[in-house]
Image (cartoon, coloured by chain):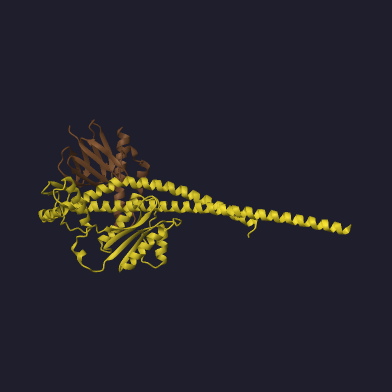
Chain colours: A brown, B yellow
């Protein structure tokens, strides 16, 4: 299977830089997949889980926060706030963040604060989902 | 001349102060290393975002967007309300670091008609409030240990104000390290973004790729010619951009919105990290020179202390000799 160059850049590090066969990412209205020689494209990436298959056939997972993806000349760049492997996620921390976000959403607040806590809520949920899959699926 | 005891007390207190400055020096140098590492880590992300904005603007040069300065209302000369985001430290003891930022911010305030200050860092906030400047009281953030989360919250606040037209322009005033010795105050316009700057950058890159088949200015005109009507499509789902089969999903407006948000956050984070690195650097240098000064003072004082002690001994000896002589004379007289 032909491959393409995938680069996942998070705010604090380069998460992955190398060959990849297929990439599935959460797009605006559902998941989207990218294979080699995809047309030129720019799209938004939502909070959720990215899966990509390496040339040796193994699947890699990453929990990402929102960002963008750019496909150009068989090269894919993903720019997200954060990207983590399921095993890197601290479940206790994510759980605490979930709790906090829920509480914040319940209390009366301005629209701006509502946006922030909603985003943190979905981030925490995505993290927990990814981490759960890792610990129970093994 | 002070007596030996006084000088000794002085020496001891200087030694204690020196211990503190030395410890602060070590702490700053450690924090500086951490901040520099953080700065390096964000660079690929930030440059990637910049590239993407450039390429979208290049393909849709006529797209009028609230975040860009090609809006028609920007051309009117009505007084604009400016927001200044000032990044200062939480503590002093960092040489001229805080003063330089504050001075620049004050200069900008004095030259603009309507403005509001958003101060990060306790020291700057206290100063501006004391001087009676309009400071946003709800905008409370510390400058130490910058995090992405803080940058995101700051961005949310600023963009919200901008969207509701409470601010027309937003500037960031922060300190940047020119090299490891000198640092300078930077003023950057955060919003609206300067679209021509991005387009120009993309032109240069394209020109480089095509090995100078055309120069930048010509290319800009071509692109305007070709894509003049592309901006009618900006809210359609999944837009194809005719010339190079450039697919944008779900729509250029949505992508650009996210892009700008992330860009502003990335920029804010970068500025926070850069400012904290500069602060630690400034503090490190200030503490270094304080330690040097203390060493010099100790040297002088120890010389003085020896001199005083010597003088005291000499005086005692003279007194003893004088006493002995007097006794001798008395004995002679008695005989």
Left or right of B238, for residue A114: right
Quadrant location of the N terminus of chain B in the rendered image:
bottom right
Residue A44: x and y in percent read 21, 47
Q: Is residue B95 above or below residue B131?
A: above
Q: Residue at x 62, y 54 (%)?
A: B305
Q: Quadrant of residue B95?
A: bottom left
User: Residue B184 or B42: which is nearer the viewer?
Assistant: B184
Which residue, as the protein is rendered here, is positioned at the far top? Answer: A56
Q: Residue at x 15, y 38 (%)?
A: A37
Residue B205: x and y in percent read 20, 48
Residue B165: x and y in percent read 25, 63
How many numbered discs? 0
Left or right of B8, for residue A104: left
Quadrant location of the C terminus of chain B in the rendered image:
bottom right
Q: Please say whether residue A134 is visible from this viewpoint.
A: yes
User: Residue B64 or B320: which is nearer the viewer?
Assistant: B320
Residue B308: x and y in percent read 64, 55
Q: Quadrant of residue B227?
A: bottom left
Q: Please say whether residue A105 is visible from this viewpoint.
A: no
Q: Residue at x 50, y 52 (%)?
A: B292
């Amino acid at each position: 299977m032909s491959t393409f160059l995938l680069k996942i850049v998070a705010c604090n590090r380069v998460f992955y830089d190398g060959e990849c066969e297929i990439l599935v990412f959460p797009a605006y209205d559902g998941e989207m997949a990218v294979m080699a020689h995809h047309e030129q494209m720019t799209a938004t990436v939502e909070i959720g889980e990215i899966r990509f298959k390496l040339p040796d056939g193994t699947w890699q997972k990453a929990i990402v926060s929102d960002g963008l993806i750019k496909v150009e000349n068989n090269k894919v760049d993903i720019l997200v706030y954060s990207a983590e492997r399921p095993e890197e996620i601290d479940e206790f921390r994510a759980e605490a963040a979930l709790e906090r976000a829920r509480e914040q959403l319940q209390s009366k607040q301005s629209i701006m604060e509502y946006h922030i806590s909603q985003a943190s809520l979905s981030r925490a949920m995505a993290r927990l989902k990814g981490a759960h899959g890792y610990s129970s699926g093994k | 001349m002070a007596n030996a005891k006084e000088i000794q007390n002085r020496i001891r207190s200087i030694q204690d102060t020196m211990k503190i400055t030395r410890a602060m020096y070590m702490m700053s140098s450690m924090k500086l290393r951490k901040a520099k590492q953080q700065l390096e880590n964000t660079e690929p992300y930030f440059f990637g975002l910049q590239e993407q904005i450039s390429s979208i603007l290049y393909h849709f040069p006529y797209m009028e967007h609230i975040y860009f300065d090609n809006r028609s209302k920007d051309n009117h000369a009505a007084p604009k309300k400016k927001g200044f985001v000032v990044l200062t430290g939480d503590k002093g003891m960092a040489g001229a670091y805080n003063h330089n930022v504050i001075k620049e911010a004050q200069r900008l305030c004095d030259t603009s008609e309507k403005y509001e200050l958003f101060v990060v860092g306790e020291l700057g906030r206290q100063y501006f409030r004391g001087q009676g400047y309009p400071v946003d009281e709800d905008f409370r953030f510390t400058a130490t240990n910058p995090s992405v989360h803080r940058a995101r919250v700051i961005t949310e606040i600023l963009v919200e104000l901008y969207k509701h037209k409470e601010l027309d322009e937003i500037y960031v005033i922060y300190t940047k390290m020119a090299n490891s010795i000198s640092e300078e105050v930077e003023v950057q316009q955060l919003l609206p973004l300067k679209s021509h700057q991005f387009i120009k950058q993309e032109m240069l890159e394209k020109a480089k790729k095509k090995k100078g088949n055309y120069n930048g200015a010509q290319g800009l005109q071509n692109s305007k010619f070709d894509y003049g009507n592309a901006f009618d499509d900006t809210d359609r789902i999944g837009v194809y951009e005719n010339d190079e089969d450039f697919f944008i999903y779900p729509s250029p407006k949505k992508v650009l919105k996210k892009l700008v948000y992330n860009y502003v956050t990335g920029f804010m984070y970068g500025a926070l990290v850069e400012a904290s690195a500069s602060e630690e650097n400034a503090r490190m240098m200030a503490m270094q020179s304080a330690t040097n000064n203390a060493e010099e003072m100790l040297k002088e004082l120890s010389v003085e202390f020896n001199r005083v002690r010597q003088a005291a001994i000499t005086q005692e000896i003279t007194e003893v000799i004088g006493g002995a002589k007097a006794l001798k004379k008395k004995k002679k007289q008695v005989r």
